[in-house]
Image: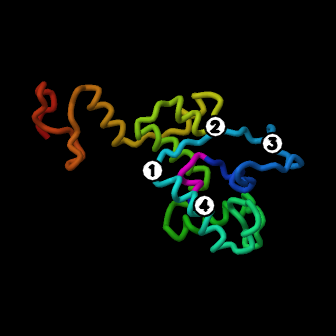
Amino acid sequence: MAPACITSIRRGRCSTRCWPTSTDSRRRFPGGPPRRRTVLTAFPWAAEIARHWIETSRVTCYPAAADVKVLFPTERGRRISPRQIDDRFAAIRDEAGLPGYLNPHCLRHTYATTLIEMGWPMALVQDQMGHTHVATTAVYTALSDDFKDRVLYRSLGMDWDDDLERPAIGQADGQAGAW
């Protein structure tokens, strides 16, 4: 599931994804077939991880998938189901001691929020997420308090001290005050 957490891919699309595209015209998709879109590599290491998974790890972990172009195979080389994704995610989540309400869809929300906090324009994040309306993308973001504080202080012309995680003292305009 590594590629899913570094892109905006939906859980249901993980289970149907082949490369370069799926050519099975008999497959029915709710709301129509998936739209072909380009997802930019937001993180410098993401493309290399995806390439390594496709070329090396996928076949090493799932030898039965060596001759098929299934991105996320089962042990028998078939496509994994959304239920299998949920079950595997839950096992990893529980082993890590994370809250039970987290699910694979939370990765999409985290991805959208991370892009916004990295300074990506909302329109680009909307495109990455595959949303038709920017309002849908806005619902996906849950900005951290730290990010909100940084934006507020920047808009007031104040510096932020990363070491202390608070506003820097001794601003040029004298607005920061003492802590």
In the rendered image, residue 116, in percent from the top left (x then y), is placed at 45, 37
In the rendered image, residue 48, in percent from the top left (x then y), is placed at 51, 57
Which numbered disc covers residue 1? 4
Earlier residue among tags 2 and 1: 1
Image quarter in which the C terminus is found: top left
Q: Are the two marked residues, 1 and 4, in contact with CB atoms closer than 8 angstroms?
A: no
Q: Nearer the viewer, mark 3 or mark 1?
A: 1
Q: Nearer the viewer, mark 2 or mark 3?
A: 2
Tell me if I can see residue 78 in this picture: yes
The span picked out in magenta is 3-8
**What amino acid type should be assigned to the residue bearing mark 2?**
Gly
Which type of secondary structure does the marked residue at label 1 adopt?
loop
Q: Identify the residue position indicated by label 1 in the image.
A: 44
Q: Residues within 10 Å of mark 4 (few under 14, many from 20)?
A: some
> On screen, 20 above or below 77?
above
Of residue 160 and residue 14, the one placed in the foreground of this image is: 14
